[in-house]
Structures are given as C-alpha cells and as structure tokens.
Amino acid sequence: MRGGFLKMEKDKHGSEIHGGFVGNFFESLPEGFVANALALTTPRDVCRLSLVCSIFRSAAEWDAVWEKFLPPDYQKILAEAEDGGGSVRCGSKKEMYLRLCDHPVIIDGGNKSFSLDKKTGKKCYMLAARDLSIIWGNTPRYWRWISVPDSRFTEVAELISVCWLEVNGKVNTSVLSTNTKYASYLVYKSTSKAYGFDSQPAEVSTGIHGVETEKKTVFLDPEASHRCENNVGPGSRLGIFGRLIRLGSQTLTSGSARLNGPKMRPDGWLEIELGEYFNEKGEEGELDMSMMEVKGGNWKGGIVIQGIEIRPKVC
C-alpha cells in the first residue's frame, strides 16, 4: 500500500498480518504535536483516540488538551458557586472537565446549576423552581415549597391544585455556548396523588423574548396519548401518575418518549421538551421557556417541579 501508513505481511500460513510501521510512525511523533492535534477535536474523539497507542494516551492527559474543552469563562462561573468553587478544585484540567460533566455546580445563590455536556463540552444550565415564574406559586392554597433528597436544589415546588397552570423561565443567551443547538426541558416528578393531566395537553414553547414563537402541545401524562389512541377515557382522581408508579419501567423507560410525552431521566426525574433554539452568537437577548395548561379549565395537582434545564441537543 502506497503512502507508508499501512504495511501488510504474510505469515508462514499465508495469512495477512499488520506490520509494525503504523505504531512506530505514531510513536515517533512529538507528544506536544499530538496534544495540539487532539485539542482540535472533541472530548469524545480524544477518549477514542487515546486507545490508538501510548503516545495518544499520554497526550490525551495534557492540560492543554482539556483546557480547550473548558468554557473560557468557567473560572468566573465557578467563583459564583455557593462554596466558592472549592468543591471543584481538581488536580488536572481533565479531572475538572469530568467533574463539571458529572456533578453540576450550584450557582446564582442557589437558583441555578451549571454543568458541561460530556460529549461536546458545551454549557448546560438548570433554573431552579425558585428562579421560575410560577403563576400562584406563592399562594399556599395552590403551591407549596418543599425539600426532597433527590433534587439538586434546596427547594422544589409541589403543585397542590390549580385550574390555571403556567410556568415560565428565562435565561440570557450570552451565557450559553455559541454556535450550538439547545433544547429546554421541564424537569418534574409526580406524587401518588397526581391527577388532572390526562385529558388536556399543555402548550410549550422556547424562543427569544418579544419574538413570536411556535408553540407545540405535549402531555405531562405519559399514558395520555396511548389512551386517546385506544379510546380510553380519562383516569380518576387517583390519577395517571399513580398508575405510572405501579407500572414502573414497563410504562416509561430511560430515553423513551411517546408522542410528545415525557421521558425518564437518569436521575429518576421526568422531563418534557419545551422547544429548541440555535444560539449563534449569544447576542439575541433573553430566551423565554414556557409551559401552560390553561384551556381545559379542569383542576390538576400532585406534580413536583425541580426546574427547567437547557442543554445542547446532541444527536
């Protein structure tokens, strides 16, 4: 084969075997050269290429490589952490990167979390329920604020009962990664007394403030569309989520969604997509994210809202 990158030889039985030229070629490259090349790829590519040979594996540990994948302002963001960023001090940039991917940092006085998408290194944020605009959210008759052990925030909002359900969040596009397609998600879970979400879909949207945005309908009840297809009537007050809990993974599995319904997250919460947005230069202003169910007029309750997450939409 011409070019010298692959040499094939025959063993004594006539089978083809690889020559040692490939490994010797890569091993002869300066480690700094390899590190600079790796820094031009993606975090996922670096992990894959580190398996090629020892020079790649060694270069993949360089701080210069992982510094490229960290946001330019990550140190400023960490300075806003509730503990001053002390919990994310790491021995290397790679450790820092993986720490920010796997362990969101609480910032903005406990109202937001910051993390990185592991495949791309793009920024991810979650707005806590306290950072959202929840209609009647401060009226104890309709909502109450509680703490649950599996939330990343100290408080979540539990819906007692409303006929007008409206939740809005906003984030400035300047804090997001540029040239990135984002999607926003309402993160919530149910209680055993959840009811009223099985007969009327909610309207959701994501778009720049002041610009007309396309709305779509979703079901917070993962079984609603299935019942509609089979002409099954709405459930009783005991409700949709009580049935969801009894069925467990047979009803909803991680990564699956049925006709604009929610899907299960790895952390055990549910999420429903509110919409998509492509952040080009981060100069568009505020991004509005909304979920409303105000047309049905029926009373509903029994869900717990942790927040709204916005993260890169990776294919």
Image (tube, rainbow, N blue to C red):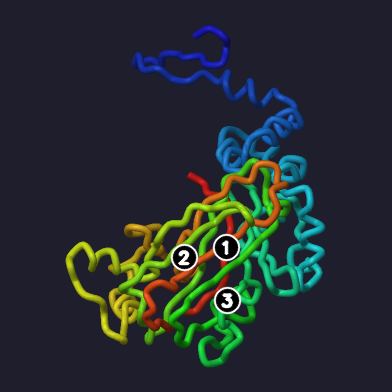
Between circles 3 and 1, the one closer to the viewer is 3
Amino acid at the residue labelled 1:
Glu
Amino acid at the residue labelled 2:
Glu
Residue 30 drawn at (x, y percent): 75, 27
Residue at point 69%, 69% (across, down): 106
Q: Which residue is mark 2?
A: 271
Q: Nearer the viewer, residue 5 or 181?
A: 181
Q: Secondary structure at mark 3?
A: strand
Q: Are marks 1 and 2 in contact (CB under 8 Å)?
A: yes
Horizontal relation, residue 135 to residue 223: left or right: right
Q: Residues within 10 Å of mark 2 (few under 14, many from 20)?
A: many
Q: Residue furthest left?
A: 231
Between circles 2 and 3, the one closer to the viewer is 3
Q: Could you tell which of marks 1 and 2 lies nearer the N-terminus?
A: 2
Q: Secondary structure at mark 1?
A: strand
Q: Quadrant of residue 68?
A: top right
Q: Could you tell which of marks 2 and 3 lies nearer the N-terminus?
A: 3
Q: Is residue 18 visible?
A: yes
Residue 291 drawn at (x, y percent): 50, 67
Residue at point 40%, 69% (across, down): 220
- In this picture, is 15 found above or below 57? above
Q: Which residue is mark 1?
A: 309
CA distance for labels 3 and 1? 16 Å
Amino acid at the residue labelled 3:
Ile
Q: Which residue is mark 3?
A: 134
- In this picture, is 97 found above or below 240? above
Q: Is residue 95 visible?
A: no
- In this picture, is 36 found above or below 60? above
Q: Residue furthest bottom?
A: 141
Q: Nearer the viewer, residue 315 or 15?
A: 315
